[in-house]
Amino acid sequence: MPAPDFSVAGQHVLISGGAGGIGTAFATAFRDSGAQVTICDLRPPAKDAGFAFEVIDVRDTTAVEALAARIKTLHVLIHCAGRLIRHEEHKPDVFMDIINIHLVGNMRLATAFRPHLAATKGCLINIGSMYSYFGAAMIPAYASAKTAIIGLTKSLAVAYAEDEIRVNAIAPGWIRTEISRGGREEPAFNEKVMMRLPTKRWSEPEELAGTAVFLASPAARLINGVTIPVDGGYVAS
Ligand SMILES: NC(=O)c1ccc[n+]([C@@H]2O[C@H](COP(=O)([O-])OP(=O)(O)OC[C@H]3O[C@@H](n4cnc5c(N)ncnc54)[C@H](O)[C@@H]3O)[C@@H](O)[C@H]2O)c1
């Protein structure tokens, strides 16, 4: 029996929201593991880390399809683009916009890149959240989208199995990035999170990256349709 193969060397990985905190950590981890990385985002990365970069708004179907036409080979697609707007998401227009980025954007990218992933027998990695598991009074669109990511992950895993594409998701816990800044810096919110969180600390984006690399590797070839909490035990507590 050979040792498990955790290698992603030589794979081409596309990361939406790749200029953000988690996207950058994923891009770095895949690059350092020998993969070729392209990031796409509304904005360029803060510093040039040597990744190929494409401007994209994941709400724009034409732009996503044009990106898919430019990219010839792809092994791993990670939908990391995201936004939340605290206190605003009860407004239907804002609600729709947040759903569009997280959920429809996920579907848009998956549909555009399915042929690429079919050609390489690749994989799709979606991003859930702790709000995949419970409600959020201040950000109902974000929580709805993240709950739906679990369903989308299962549905696409079943649908894409005929192409031998695996579809999984990571549900990050409480990670120190821009999107979580509002909650982190609000003492009452922060205290509520810390009371339940066994590890009692905000985590760094790099702490998620090993799970993404593992999911993309041959060692994970039997893992399909699951959402893995990487959360320091928050969901368990
Ligand atoms: N940080 C956390 O605690 C946490 C927890 C659970 C889930 N997540 C999820 O992880 C993912 C990455 O978030 P992050 O923590 O790196 O936040 P971040 O704010 O650092 O990065 C998000 C990135 O998405 C990009 N983006 C936003 N709208 C876009 C659009 N329409 N098209 C293309 N790009 C767009 C932003 O420009 C930004 O670079 C998101 O899906 C987020 O919901 C984060």
Image (cartoon, rainbow, N blue to C red):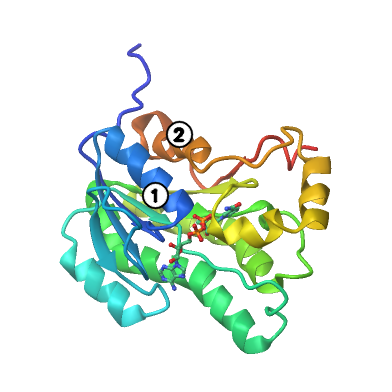
User: Do we see residue 175 in this rendering?
Assistant: yes
Nearer the viewer's eye, disc 1 or disc 2?
Answer: 1
How far, Cα to Cα, is label 1 from label 2?
Answer: 13 Å
Q: Which mark is residue 87?
A: none
Circle 1 crowding by C-alpha within 10 Å: few under 14, some 14–19, many from 20:
many
Three-letter code, disc 1: Thr
- Quadrant in which residue 202 is drawn: top right
Label 1 sits on a secondary structure element that is: helix
Q: Position of residue 180 (x, y in %)?
A: 62, 57
Horizontally, residue 55 falls left or right of residue 166, namely left
| Labelled disc at residue 24 | 1
Number of dots carrying numbers: 2
Image side of residue 162 versus residue 172, left or right: left
**Residue identifier under label 2:** 210
Q: Quadrant of residue 214?
A: top left
Where the N terminus falls, by quadrant? Answer: top left
User: Which structural element holds mark 2?
Assistant: helix
Q: Is residue 221 left or right of residue 207?
A: left
Question: Of the residues under marks 1 and 2, which one precedes in the sequence?
Answer: 1
